[in-house]
Amino acid sequence: MAASERRPRADRDGAGGVGSGKRKRRKVVLAATAGALALGGAAVVVPTAFADDPVSEALAGAAEILPVDDSLLGLVDVGEVEELTESLTYADSQDAVTVSGPDAGYVKVHFERLLLNEGDYVTVSSPDGAESYRYEESMVDQWATSITGDTAIVELHRAESGPASDALGVLIDRAAYGFASDVVDALVAEQADAARPEESVCSGDEKKSSACYRSSYPEVVEHAEPVARLLIDGTVLCTAFRVGEDNRMLTNHHCFTETWEAQQTEVWFGYDCVACGADAANIPVKVGGQQVLKTSKPLDYTLFTVDDFKRIDQFGYLELADEPAKAGEAIYIPQHPAGRPTEIAMESSVDGGNCVVKNAVYDGYIAGSDVSYYCDTEFGSSGSPVISRDTHEVVALHHFGGCPNSGVNAQLIKAEIGRLL
């Protein structure tokens, strides 16, 4: 689909975000056999001990939300969802189905219902088997992990002696197809044009693939490893990063806010180019979001967990800074702009060569909450860490374009979530 044919996506609270009340989400009438399944996505109650910290509460709770230009929010759709009617049941003679979208960047199938006997399982794989994900537990209304490329093979693996029942098996009711990279690039350019004269790329595009800094700035590349690409509900991009040594991830409130949304989100680690200047990327480690622990619109953050933490422990973590950012301080921003493999904004001709803090105190959703800079970002970079070159600690959580671009002061966020880390 051409960029000019894209439909506008629903806003949240009129702010251009992803709204749980406005996002299309088809209700499914399940067979009686699925009634006993427990549904995920229950609301999370934060214990009283983790109530809002009075320091940031005084700023965020009492302050008025400032008007924000929707075009400054770094969200972009990178795919579309199509309805399907595919099934593999215990009564069928076939045991595999192919789901394909011509020239798609990825294919992500959605299970309306997955009901299995103990010991049986379903796999979703690439045609060459390089990427494969296994599902052993029954579930309803859940996305499978995406497969890179335009084809996914869904296969039912069951015991030969099992019952020939059409109530058991997998029903696929839709699939998300990612747009090809050139289409995504055109969409991002279209968004940037709509946002002008304020935009996120401030003077040319001086971001570079993380692979280009492996020899010259190994510490910077090392601290980019905890930064992850988010694929939300099959079509929406953001960035996130692991914060603290436990199972904790941080992104923007305007990316998602609720546990059921986290559970519809893929978190990609290790998605970077194999070499500087190469188009090929490493196969990422993909895990799913699990639970939202805390979220704030005034400070535009969401703290959440993932469902297979052991698989991502190898990528390390970042820490929120103890000291406030200072004007002129050198910084860098690892990110997944337009969903591309990791890029790092560290150079800025606007600032004489290096990315630096322009204003240590700048307006965000509320007055004085942000740190500003001219480091280049793009749609899809929302939720990226703004990191000090001196300490490699996170001084801000990127969320707005505008040149200067800006991120929420990490100290304000830490005051609210520090006891959860």
Image (tube, rainbow, N blue to C red):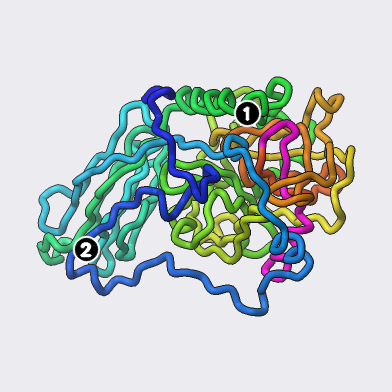
Asked if the magenta segment contains residue 61, the reply would be: no
Instruction: Identify the secondary structure beneath mark 2.
Output: loop
Q: Residue at x 24, y 56 (%)?
A: 157
Asked if the magenta segment contains residue 409, the reply would be: yes
**Residue 210 in view of the camera:** no
Going by the numbered disc 1, the residue's amino acid type is Ala
Seen in the image, is 170 located left or right of residue 405? Answer: left
Q: Which residue is mark 2?
A: 30
Q: Is the C terminus in the top left, top right, bottom left or bottom right quadrant? A: bottom right
In this rendered view, identify the residue nearer to me: 247 or 84. 84
In the image as oriented, which residue stretches furthest toward the top? 204
Q: Residue at x 78, y 28 (%)?
A: 347
Q: Residue at x 84, y 58 (%)?
A: 322
In this rendered view, identify the residue nearer to me: 14 or 336. 14
Seen in the image, is 338 located left or right of residue 127? Answer: right
Write down the quadrant of residue 53 in the picture.
Answer: bottom right
Q: Which residues are magenta?
A: 401-421
Residue 235 screen position, x and y as percent: 43, 41
Q: Which residue is mark 1?
A: 275
Q: Is the N terminus in the top left, top right, bottom left or bottom right quadrant? A: top left
Residue 309 screen position, x and y as percent: 56, 61
